Amino acid sequence: MTNHHPPITDPATGEIVPDTFFLPDGDAFIPTAWTRSGWDAGTMRGGAVAGLLMGDDTAAARAHLRRAIALDPSDVDAWNWLGNGLSRDGDPELAIAAYRTASRLDPLYTPALMNLAQSAGDLGRPDEIDRLVVASRRAGAGPDILAALAAYRALASNDLSESAKALARGGKDDEGRARPASLMPWILTLERLDMLEPLHRIVDCPPWYPALVRGQVLPPMSIDGRKVTPAEFWLSFYYSYAAARALFNHGETERLVTLYRQAFGNADRFLAEARRAQQLSSTATTLAMALAARGQEAEARYILAAAERDLDKPGRRVWQRDDLADLAAIKAAQGEHREALALLGQAVDRQWLPDGRAKPIDLRQEPAFAKLRGDPRFEALRSQILATVARERAEVGSLPL
């Protein structure tokens, strides 16, 4: 059936939303029976959000969100979650368009503001954040939102010290804890500065976290009196990257493989679960290196190839800096050193800095880059990153954090 229904428009501006937001043939048709039987915009959005949170098929979730928008084009939550789905599927340009629509509908809707600011920063577009600041200030945004946006604006150009100063001005409450809008900017800023001790006070991260992220200790296998399960070891956002890296760098490859087998049994289940948890691109390389070290090269190659396909999707037009660095690590683990160095160079040229968690500040600690150590090109990129971090730390100075 041909879709003769009008395209979705942004109700704040009257502009037609980009083509990718048009529903495919037949999808824009909302049968009257749906609305009569309770299939309203909120129902469609709720099911899609639940699917995205559970890591389910994002294409199906996006279809539900588009139907929700067709039913109610002013649904801010639906636009924001559509952006999340598009971002997760590696389409940051269209994700930004969805976040922008949500922020125009409600200039004080914090989730969309922060998603738009972070996505624009990742693509090196500070002008987008500048416009967002103007609109938010005009709408009466409070100091917490403005501090978070200022931090994202600074992070876009790796001005870590300015980000820290902005957050110190307006990103903490009276008890010195991160305000809700500033939580992620605090984490991104202090991790990149390798100033992890203040994280404990500001965002309540556990006291053992700084030493783990720096690779100084083995990961705790029980937290708050509860044992870390094998699946949690591999699929916990703030724990898994650093934990796996620490075990590998301490020679515990057999233990890593054992935890992998206990959690998943085989590569296909690992790939499915890691995708659902959005952990695949950074976790796959360390696991593959451990499998190869234990003589299971075929399985290692299989996992790396799947992780590469997950990043380098057909038709992908725009690459975020973190994705370039992740693909560089995959290529290095596959032994394609020339391509790995080229990708890493592209990321650094676009002002990429490791976050200290998914990728260590000192790239020599990254297992996937082990065979690049000593290569003049790799060492030059590593030194450039370390010099940037050292300079920014010096500029933070005695700022009370």
Image (cartoon, grey):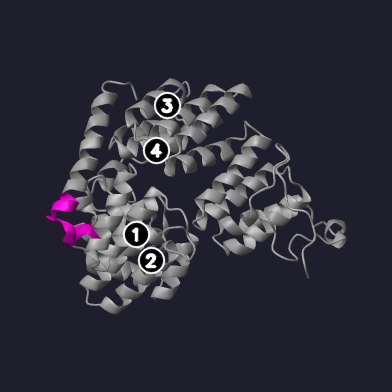
Residue drawn at x 78%, y 54% as measured from the top left: 6
Q: Nearer the viewer, mark 1 or mark 4?
A: 1
Residue drawn at x 63%, y 60% as measured from the top left: 61
Callout 3, which amino acid?
Leu
Dominant secondary structure, magenta: helix
Q: Residue 325 location in percent, x, y?
A: 33, 53
> Number of callouts in the render?
4
- Between 80 and 227, the one lying in front of the other is 80
Mark 1 / mark 3, whichever is N-terminal? 3
Q: Is residue 55 left or right of residue 103?
A: left
Category of crowding for the residue at label 1, using alpha-carbon neighbours closer than 10 angstroms: few (below 14), some (14–19), many (at least 20): many
The residue to which callout 2 is attached is: 308
Q: Judging from the image, what secondary structure is the residue with disc 3 in?
A: helix
Is residue 354 in view? no
Callout 4, which amino acid?
Ile
Image marks 3 and 4: residues in contact by CB distance under 8 Å: no
Q: Is residue 338 left or right of residue 127?
A: left
The residue to which callout 4 is attached is: 187
Callout 2, which amino acid?
Glu
Q: Which mark, residue 167? A: 3
Q: Nearer the viewer, mark 4 or mark 2?
A: 2
Q: Residue 137 location in percent, x, y?
A: 58, 23
Residue 164 included in the magenta stretch of the image: no
Is residue 346 in view? yes
Q: Judging from the image, what secondary structure is the residue with disc 4 in?
A: helix
Image marks 1 and 2: residues in contact by CB distance under 8 Å: yes
Q: Which of the 4 image quadrants contains residue 327?
A: bottom left
The residue to which callout 1 is attached is: 327
Residue 378 included in the magenta stretch of the image: yes
Q: Judging from the image, what secondary structure is the residue with disc 2 in?
A: helix
